[in-house]
Amino acid sequence: MLQDIRDNAQGTIAKIIIGVLIVSLSIWGMDAIIGGFSGEPEVATVNGEDITERDFLRVVQMETQRRLAAMNNPDPSLLDDDQIRREVLESLIQEQVLIQDASNQGLELSDADIDSLITQMPQFQVDGKFNRDRFVATVRNLGMGVGEFREAMRRQYVVSQIRAGLVQSGVVAEENAAHLLRIQNQTRDFRMVRLSADDVAGQVEVTDEEVAAYYEDNTGLFMLPERVDAAYIALSLEALADTVEISDEEIAAYYESRAAELADEERRAAHILIEDNDSAGETIAEIQRRLAEGEEFASLAKEFSTDTVSAEQGGDLGFAGRGVYGDAFEDVLFAMEAGEVSEPVSTSFGTHLIKLLDVRKSEVPALEEIRDQLRRELASDKAAAQFAEVRSQLSDLAYAANDLADPASELGLEVREKAGVTRDGGEAPFDHPGLVRQLFSDDVLKDGYNTELIDVGDSVSVVARVKEYFEREQQPLDEVREEIRAALLEQKVREAQRERAEQLIAGLQDGKELADLNVGTGDWQEFSGQSRNNAELGAGVMNDVFSLQRPVEGQPVYGMSAAGEDMVVIALDKVTEGEVAAGGEDLQQLQNFLASLEGQREYTAYQQYLRERAEVDRP
């Protein structure tokens, strides 16, 4: 039988089949051949067009990576994979609806249009020119093929065109914008009198019965959450450095090797800065020619340098040490001899010609003055070399141990304790979600194992175990009695202040004067021409001032507002409309902003309209 297969493989029929496969592969690729036989799985069908599982999973992966990148300490276990998949699928359905709508409107890009867009994208350029290698590498890093990327661009571009068209179609009448701006620029004249907590504190009392009743009615507020007391070992580069022994001989040798660096060196530089443009090369060549002919650097700096401040001083930048200039500038400056002029140096500011004017150095500090500093530097260097090894040892020892005492003893580390760590975390290092999640895992909480070694910060690793577990429990009344009393007292004081403010307002509305109403704090405070953003009085008070109705026929309008622990009574005397300059910049900006909001609203409504009409099938 095997011989029959070999013979038939050399026959005409076999050659025809192989020829067809080769042609098909060269035109469409292997994916097309496989897809032609088996079909590609889909996750949804929108108006008869499939969203493939491959596209869906790629976008899920990209969205997952985006969310991880947004975390301070990326942790995949904190992501809700199901939620990501639901949101991605819905976004792909919405995108497909918009793509179909664009196609129905005849919006599409040709291959030449796509090529033009890609070659103009700066992320694919090197030295201002399109670079195919960078393009291919970038696309592959996205997990896409070149063809997929081109098709994605085609889809996104037409969708963006629809969105831009609708958003830009928003229109807001100038008078509507002017009306809002007049309100925004409005000022108000008002008076205030304060009622402090002390004015009414003597009038209120909280009884034991009220405390007990509040406790019974709000038992959920006084539940202690599930928590643990934890023991832990923290391995840090800093702590490891403290255990490293450094001999006097090592310090002396280190001091000698760094003597030149320990002397502070400053260099006085002058420069001529040329802005990068088409003629920059010719300008630099002319300056170099004139320098070679003996012209002074300072005079050429005044004539040519675009750094106008230093140019007035002949390009002189004064003395500076390392770390002041950019790397490129500094590397050249500190490699020069006094009086030397550099070759052109390119930085983000432009192209520099640098002249070293002078060098000054301070004396090397005596060894005894910096002994502790050198000891710390040596210890830190040695600890850095040991950290990875010690970390690995701690990880292995803690994994095999039934407690933390033995690993700590073997490595010369300290076992510390932290009480009251909840599932929401606690003080450092238990402010790290990964460590807390491990601490409350079944292996650690129920079976008594140590956690894995968790990196909670730069060069800081922690292993922990549960020392004692506490279930969720009710706090006894005696433990929270004074807390409840203080809260009820504050509530009653505020109610008394509000009641007193209402009495004052009623009296003022009846035509009485402030002096007749027994206000403990005294006279009115007057405020004229105040805008909404008075930082002195605060946003809360100003919001209440501007929420009052306009005075009618010169009669004040009264209101109240909480201001910290005080309550203030407000008398609004006058409202002055804000001025709006016709055709002014503020008016134009507000009108454009409102029009953009209106356009965005219309686009959102259009999206919803298309989505509701679409026929969506999900397998």
Image (spheres, grey):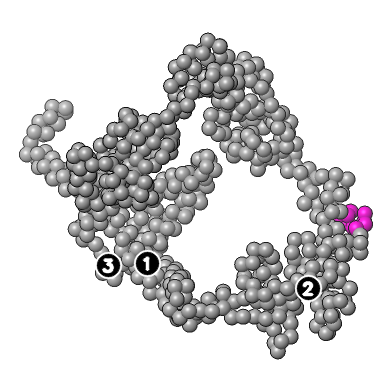
Q: Are marks 3 and 1 in contact (CB under 8 Å)?
A: no
The image quadrant that residue 3 belongs to is top left
Distance from label 3 to label 1 (Cα)?
Answer: 12 Å
Picture mark count: 3
Q: Which residues are magenta?
A: 206-214
Instruction: Count residues near mark 1 (Cα–Cα under 10 Å), then give few for <14, some for 14-19, many for 20+.
Output: many
The residue labelled by disc 2 is 524
Disc 3 on helix, strand or loop?
loop
The residue labelled by disc 3 is 107
Disc 1 on helix, strand or loop?
helix
Distance from label 2 to label 1 (Cα)?
Answer: 55 Å
Relative to 254, is 452 on the left or the right? right
Q: Which quadrant does the C terminus fall into?
A: bottom left
Question: Which badge, 3 or 1, comes first in the chain's sequence?
Answer: 3
Question: Which badge, 2 or 3, comes first in the chain's sequence?
Answer: 3
Distance from label 2 to label 3 (Cα)?
Answer: 67 Å
The residue labelled by disc 1 is 163
